[in-house]
């Protein structure tokens, strides 16, 4: 059985030649949740965008390949790639406000994709959307479907986006910090909802987060990213019981515990970061030699 | 907050005042032959410089008085409105179509398309507009269609600039990226996702531009570069009124008031419409 998503040795550079992804390899098996954890600027979003084919124009992939259900994305024609990505993947975004078109009502926005991309009938799409709204515990679907995005609360909007993401039964969902823009009280509900729908639908998720607490709750596998490089990869339980890489250990030490709120003020250990910088510098040097 | 919104929607006086005036002026222009009490071209030396109806010496049927050739001012104003509105609609729509399309393309696609279009706009805007208009009409020749063409040629950049900036802002939003991930084509995204979000601005600009076209047409008529026939135009009437300001102030004042009210109404109407159609402001 092939992996749902397989990234091999992916490197990407900015216009100035600076590497933002450093030979990243990771795989997501069907039905599995893989967390991608790392601090801000590590390149988590960049990996998600690379998979979904929406890298900013300033970022260029220079090596490596990505396979979606065994299909090599790099070998497909742009049109075929778009169609494949559109049919097999979905995104649960970080900011549920800007991810919805402000000038269109929720209903047409949600059904549109099923009708126009997947060729469903309007009726079928409508039934599907309502079923999903029910699954994300929206109790007044009529009102929601008639609303404009700004008329809904942040939590509601994120529920709508989760419903939309699962509606087309994608094989892979990229969830990019889907709870960070939300109120703390809503964060947990949304997280539970994603976990529940994931289990019911058996969808693989690449779950981007900087929060180790979230990693522990939702994922089976973890990749720890630092400066565009995967520094450790493990089963989630294994990672928490026996972190191997010093950066992972430092990250854990810096993660706030509920019993000790002041711990959140602790930065990641300096010496670990210095060690990492050296590690990355040597890796870059080694990489540059064959790549000019 | 919801209540405040509803109140603001119901009682948008500027929408109704501006829209009301424009509707009135438009209807008067359309039905000018039926409404006008006199032939706007008929001269009568016996009736020259009649004052408006509330002053001594006014004649019934000549409500706003007559000019120095004895022509009825009111009839001339509503007939002048015909040309004003034709120019306003035709020129503004033409400028809007060209400018908004290019602006949308530049803003959404960015890159080369944006660089080329923005450069053209920069060059265009280097010309002072009124001078540009006079120059163009001198080249194109006078007449209704060349006035319309001149205004459209000059003013499409206004649409292009604003719509480019807005489309660019919208294109960076996640919903556009989401549409891309879902598999929509670029042109489809531009038209279905981005365009509806810049439409309120297009509407506001379109209305504003109509007012501007009215002014430009008046200026061109004023300097006698507009319509070469005898048809009355607001700018032409103002030019004539200026000559007899001491004997008959009304020939200058009434067309000025009409012009200002119309231009103001167009801009206010546009703003009010935008506020109304913008789902976020609404
Ligand atoms: N559009 C862009 N053009 C050029 N560089 C970018 C762009 N977006 C991000 N970057 C850079 O790429 C690197 C990775 O950014 P990315 O957004 O993937 O980080 P992240 O791990 O998602 O961080 P966060 O937790 O803040 O979302 C950063 O150094 C960032 O400055
Ligand atoms: Mg990010």
Image: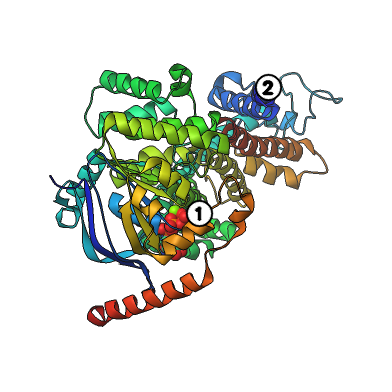
Residue A135 in picture, x, y percent from top left: 38, 23
In depth, the one of A284 and B257 nearer the eye is: A284
Quadrant of the frame with the C terminus of chain B: top right
Residue B208 in picture, x, y percent from top left: 58, 42
Residue that extends furthest to the left in the rendered view of this protein: A1
Residue A7 in picture, x, y percent from top left: 24, 56
* Mark 2 beta carbon near ligand 1 (under 8 Å): no
> Marks 2 and 1: which is nearer the front?
2
In depth, the one of B95 and B251 nearer the eye is: B95
Where on the picture, by quarter, is residue A247?
bottom left
Task: Report which residue position mark 1 lands on.
Answer: B161
Chain letter of mark 2 equals: B
Residue that extends furthest to the front in the rendered view of this protein: A241
Q: Colour scheme in the image?
A: rainbow
Task: Report which residue position mark 2 lands on.
Answer: B3
Question: Residue at coordinates 59% horizontally, 57% vertically from top-left?
Answer: B130
Question: Residue at coordinates 24% horizontally, 39% vertically from top-left?
Answer: A171
In the rendered view, tell whether residue B111 sits above or below residue A67: below
B41 vs B260, left or right, is: left
């Amino acid at each position: 059985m092939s992996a749902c998503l397989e990234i091999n040795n992916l490197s990407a550079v900015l216009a100035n030649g600076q590497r933002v992804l450093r030979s990243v390899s990771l795989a997501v098996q069907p039905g599995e949740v893989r967390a991608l954890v790392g601090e801000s600027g590590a390149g988590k979003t960049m990996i998600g965008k690379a998979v979904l084919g929406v890298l900013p124009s300033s970022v260029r992939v220079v090596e490596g390949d990505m396979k979606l259900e065994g299909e090599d994305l790099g070998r497909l024609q742009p049109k075929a790639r778009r169609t494949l990505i559109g049919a097999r993947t979905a995104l649960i975004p970080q900011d549920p406000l800007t991810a919805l078109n402000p000038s269109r009502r929720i209903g047409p926005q949600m059904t549109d994709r099923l009708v126009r991309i997947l060729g469903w009938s309007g009726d079928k799409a409508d039934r599907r959307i309502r079923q999903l709204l029910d699954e994300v515990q929206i109790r007044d679907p009529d009102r929601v479907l008639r609303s404009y995005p700004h008329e809904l609360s942040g939590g509601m909007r994120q529920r709508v986006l989760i419903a939309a993401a699962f509606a087309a039964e994608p094989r892979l969902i990229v969830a990019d910090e889907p709870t960070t823009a939300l109120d703390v009280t809503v964060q947990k509900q949304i997280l539970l909802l994603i976990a529940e729908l994931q289990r019911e639908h058996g969808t693989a998720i690449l779950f981007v987060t900087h929060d180790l607490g979230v990693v522990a709750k939702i994922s089976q596998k973890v990749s720890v990213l630092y400066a565009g490089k995967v520094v450790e990869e493990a089963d989630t339980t294994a990672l928490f019981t026996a972190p191997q890489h010093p950066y992972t250990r430092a990250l854990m030490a810096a993660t706030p515990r509920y019993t000790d709120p002041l711990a959140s003020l602790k930065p990641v250990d300096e010496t670990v970061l210095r060690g990492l910088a050296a590690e990355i510098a040597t890796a870059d040097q080694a990489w540059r030699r064959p790549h000019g | 907050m919801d209540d405040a919104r509803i109140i603001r929607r119901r009682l948008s006086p500027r929408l109704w005042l501006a829209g009301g005036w424009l509707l009135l002026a438009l209807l008067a222009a359309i039905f000018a032959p039926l409404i006008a009490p006199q032939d706007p071209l008929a001269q009568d030396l016996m009736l020259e410089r009649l004052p408006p109806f509330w002053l001594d010496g006014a004649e019934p049927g000549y409500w706003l008085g007559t000019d120095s050739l004895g022509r009825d001012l009111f009839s001339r104003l509503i007939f002048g409105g015909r040309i004003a509105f034709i120019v306003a609609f035709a020129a503004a729509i033409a400028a809007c179509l060209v400018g908004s399309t290019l602006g949308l393309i530049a803003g959404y696609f960015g890159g080369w398309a944006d660089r080329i279009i923005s450069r053209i706009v920069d060059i265009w805007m280097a010309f002072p507009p009124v001078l540009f208009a006079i120059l163009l009409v001198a080249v194109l020749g006078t007449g209704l269609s060349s006035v319309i063409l001149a205004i459209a040629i000059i003013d499409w950049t206004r649409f292009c600039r604003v719509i480019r900036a807005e489309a660019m802002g919208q294109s960076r939003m996640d919903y556009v990226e989401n549409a891309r991930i879902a598999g929509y084509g670029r042109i489809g995204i531009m038209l279905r996702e981005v365009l509806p979000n810049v439409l309120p601005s297009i509407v506001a600009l379109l209305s504003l531009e109509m007012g501007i076209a009215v002014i430009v047409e008046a200026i061109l008529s004023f300097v006698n570069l507009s319509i070469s026939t005898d048809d009355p135009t607001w700018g032409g009437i103002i030019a004539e009124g200026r000559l007899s300001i001491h004997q008959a102030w009304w020939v200058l004042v009434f067309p000025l008031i009409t012009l200002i009210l119309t231009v103001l109404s167009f801009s206010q109407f546009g703003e009010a419409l935008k506020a109304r159609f913008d789902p976020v402001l609404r």
